[in-house]
Amino acid sequence: MTFFLGWIFFSIVAGMFAQIRRNRNGAGWFFVAILFSPLVAFVLLLILPSLPARLTRKEIIEQLQQLQTLRQCPHCAEMVKREAKVCKHCHRDLPEAEPLAPAEPTPKLNGIKLCPIATEPCTLSDAEYWKANPTT
């Protein structure tokens, strides 16, 4: 009986380790530990790399705002796509979105065009530069 209780206890610990330390599904790893062995689950968790941390909804919205793909509805203050004509939350018409800032042109230093990758003056025309340095 104590063997089974120990098996279940260490399976729970393996699931918690997976969830907290490795950003993996704790319930899934609990079942892996129950079916195979808590020791096997721990060895696999130590071998496998940690998954990147998941972003919260608020962090995702902030990143999308920085990319200028979302904007705020002036009527209900909810976030909607930049191209939206009608708010999906309050169903009211939205004003036209402000135009995006133009992409930065090729940098220049005292009127001399700089290479797109380095900060030294280009000695080739744009076409010659890209033929010599293809981006594949």
Image (spheres, grey):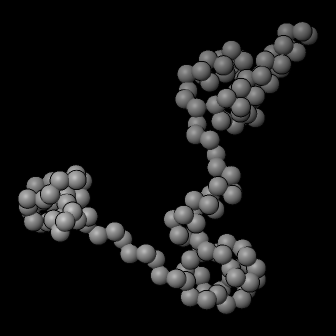
Does residue 68 appear left or right of residue 18 in this picture? left
The location of residue 105, given as percent across then percent down, is: 29, 70
Q: Quadrant of the N terminus?
A: top right
Residue extending furthest toward the top: 2
Q: Is residue 46 above or below residue 95?
A: above
Residue 43 located left or right of residue 12: left
Image quadrant where residue 49 sits: top right
Q: Position of residue 100 (x, y in %)?
A: 46, 77
127 on left or right of 118? left
Report whether 94 appears left or right of 69: right
Q: Quick check: 16 above or below 6?
A: below
> At 69% across and 57% down in the image, what residue appears?
57
In which quarter of the view is residue 116 placed? Answer: bottom left
Return the residue nearer the eye: 1 or 116: 116
Task: Looking at this view, name the residue that lies furthest to the front.
Answer: 110
**Residue at (83% x, 19% y) in the render:** 9
Residue depicted at x 72% and y 18% = 38
Can residue 29 be seen from the camera position used here? no
Residue 107, given in percent of the width and then of the height, sits at 26, 64
Looking at the image, how many numbered discs can be counted on the residues? 0
Q: Is residue 69 above or below residue 95?
A: above
The answer to whether 123 is drawn above or below residue 99 in the figure is above
Between 6 and 81, which is closer to the camera in this rendering? Answer: 81
Residue 62 in view of the camera: yes
Write the residue at 8% across / 59% down: 123
